[in-house]
Amino acid sequence: MASNNRQHHDRHQRKNKIKDQLIYPKVDKEFHFYYQNSGRKKLLKVKIVVPLTCHTNELAHRLITAHNLPCYLLGKLQASLKEFVSSTLCQLQVDKAEQSIHHLKQFGPDVIKDISDHWCKCLQDEVAHWSDHSNKRNAVQSIQLDNGQSVAQVYHALIHSPAMEAILQLECTYASVVKEIVKQRNTELEQFEIQHQQQLEIAIQSGIASDRKVSRLAAQHMEELQFKNAKWNSTLSDLMENQKREFYAWMVRVYNSMVENNGVPTERTLSMPHSIVATLSRAAPDSHLNHESNNHVDNRMEESFTIYLGTQKKTMHNIRLMIGHPLDLCRSAYTGSIGSGIGPPPQRIQTALSLYSSTLNGLILLVDDKPNCYTGIKNEFAMICEESSEFHFLSHPEQLHHIRRSIQKSQSTRAKRQDSEDNDIDSLEMLPEDQHSYDPSVSDAISNMDSAVKAGYLENQRNRSATLSSLRRDSFWDEDDDSVVLALGDFYSTHHSNLSDIHVVYHLVVNDDVKSDRLPNRHPILTGLRNALNTAASNDVTTITIPLLLVNEMTEEMTISWCVKRAELIFKCVKGFMMENEMWSNNQACIVQFLIPKGISEEMFNTFTGMLPGIFRMAAALNLSTTAVHE
C-alpha cells in the first residue's frame, strides 16, 4: 500500500514538473528599429522582455517618449514591434514544443496519458465555460430522444397527460424564483440611483465641488450603475439558463416514465427537481411575509358576437369587444411568491395546452419605429417577458437581435439591387440615338424601366414573410443595432411561451397619424394591419387581438365623434381583410378580439356594440316564445 502511494506521489511530481516546463519563460530579446531623421539613417536598440506585460501600442508610446523619437514614427514603430513580438513568441513556442517532447520521451506511457487527460479536461472545461449561450439554447432545443421524439413533441404529449398539473406548477415555481431576483434587482438599482442623486445634489448645493468634479462624480455613478446592471443581468441569464436545462431534463425523465408505465408517470418522477426543493425549503419560513393575494376579480366589460362571412360558402367566426390594455393579456395573473402554494391561473393552462397546436393566440402591439426594448410600451413588454424563463423560444432580447440583423441584411440587399437597377438605367440612357432606332426594345426598356421596378417592388411588398413586413426604401440602417429604423406600417413578430394569453406578438409600427381625424383606407398603418392579419391567418393564429381605436390609451382630443369614426373604420377594414383572405374562409372558426382602451364609458361601449350588426352579418338569434314551447 505504501509503495503504491509512493509511486502515485512520484508520478504526480513528475507531471507537475512537466506542466511547469510547458509555461513560456520570459526572455530578453534585443529589438532593432531603423528609421531616418533629418536625412540620416539611425538605429534604435532596446532590450525587450517577451512575452510583453503591456500592449505593443503602449510600448511604442513609451519608446518614443523615452528616446525622443519623432511622433510621425509611431505607426511604423508599432508595426515593427508587433512583428518582432509575434516572431519571438512563435520561436518560443517551437523551442518549448521541442523541449517538451524531449522531456516526455524520458517518462513512460502512464505519465504521458495522465498529462494528456489533464489538458483535455482543461480544454473541455474552458470551452464549456466560455461557449456562447445561444449555442447552449440551440443544443437544448434540439434534444432528440431515443425514439426520435423532439422536445416540442414531448412537451405537447406531457401537457395533454396527467403530468399537466406538475408541469404548470413547476413553471410557476420557476417564475416565482425569477420574480424574486427581478424584485431584488429593481430594489437595489432604485436605492442606488436615489443615493447617487442625493450625492450629486449635496455636491452641487455645497458649492465646493467644481464643474469638473461634479461631471467626474456623475460619470463614476454611471459606471457603477452599468456595472450593477451587468452583474444582475448575468445573474438572471445564468438562472434562466439553469432553469431551462433542468426543466428539459425533468421533462424527459417524466416522459420516459410515462412511456414505460402505459401513459401514467410515477409519483417519483413527478417530484420537483432538487434545486426547487431547496429553494422552497429556504423560502418556507418567510412565505407568509411575501404572499400576495390573488383574489382580484377582473370586472372588465366585454361582449361576444357570432358573425358569418361569405355568400355562397358561409364561414362562422366570433367577434369579441372588451375593455383593457394590450399588456393585460401578456402579464401573468399569477401573483404568488415562492412557497405560497398558489397554482397556475386558468389563462396560463389554456395557453400551455395550445402552445404546439394550430390554434395560437396573437396580439397586435402598437410600437415606434425602432425594434428595441428601451422605451415606452416596448420596455414594459420586455419587463413582462423578463419575469419568467422562456423554455421554448429564444429570449425576447435575442429575438430582437436576430430581427435587427435580418432587417440590416434585407435593407442591404435591397439597396444593392436598387443600385444595380439604377446603373442599368444609366447605361441604357447613355446609348447613342441611332442605336435606339435600330432596336425598339431598348427605348421601351428606358421608358418602362421605372414602372417595372415599381411593379416588382409592389409584388415584393405583397409577399411579406411571417417574421418581418417589407422594409420600404425610406428605412435605413448602419452598423449600430440601435439605429435600425423601420418604416410606417412595417411590423415584426416575436414568439413567446411564458405570457398569460398570447403566443405571438405582432409589433406594428405607428406614429402620431393614429391620432388624426382622417385616416385614409390606404394609409401605411392600415396596410400594415392588413399584412399582419394575413400573416397571422397563414400561421395558425386563430385568435387575434386588435386595438380597436389604434391607440393604447385615451387622450383628451379623442372625442366621441372621433371614437365612433375610428371604430367604424377599423370594423370595416378588418371585415374587408377577412373576406379577401382565403385563410379566413376555411372551416375553422376564428376569434377576433377588439380591445378598447381603458377609460371608455359604458355608453360608448354600448355604442360600439350597436355598430356591429350594421357592418357584420350576425347569426340570427333563436327566440323560443311560450307558445312555441307548448306546441
Image (tube, grey):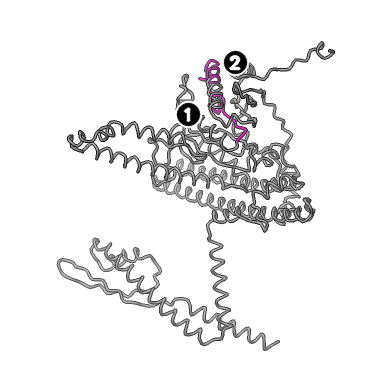
Type of the residue with mark 1: Thr
User: Within 10 Å of the Cα at label 1, are there few (<14), some (14-19), or many (20+) other Cα atoms?
Assistant: some
Type of the residue with mark 2: Gly
Q: Is residue 54 above or below residue 568?
A: below
Residue 246 visible in image? yes
Disc 2 target residue = 614
- Compute the Cα span from label 2 to label 1: 24 Å
Find the residue positioned furthest to the left: 39
* Front one among 536 and 130: 536
User: Within 10 Å of the Cα at label 2, are there few (<14), some (14-19), or many (20+) other Cα atoms?
Assistant: few
* Residue at the image position 48 percent from the left and 23 percent from the top: 515
Check the picture and name the quadrant holding the N terminus: bottom right
* Front one among 213 and 612: 612
Check the picture and name the quadrant holding the C terminus: top right
The image quadrant of residue 54 is: bottom left
Query: Looking at the image, how many numbered discs can be counted on the residues?
Result: 2
Rendering coords of residue 184 (x, y %): 62, 47
Rendering coords of residue 555 (x, y %): 53, 23
* Direction from residue 386 to residue 260 in the image, left or right: right
Tag shown at residue 505 = none
* Residue at the image position 79 percent from the left and 54 percent from the top: 261
Tag shown at residue 527 = 1
Q: For the residues labelled 2 and 1, say whether their Cβ atoms are less than 8 Å apart.
A: no
Q: Residue 69 lies in magenta, yes or no?
A: no
Rendering coords of residue 186 (x, y %): 59, 44
Which numbered disc flags the more N-terminal residue, 2 or 1?
A: 1
- Which type of secondary structure does the marked residue at label 2 adopt? helix
* Residue at the image position 41 percent from the left and 78 percent from the top: 94
Q: What stretch is highlighted in magenta?
A: 541-568
Q: Residue 548 lies in magenta, yes or no?
A: yes
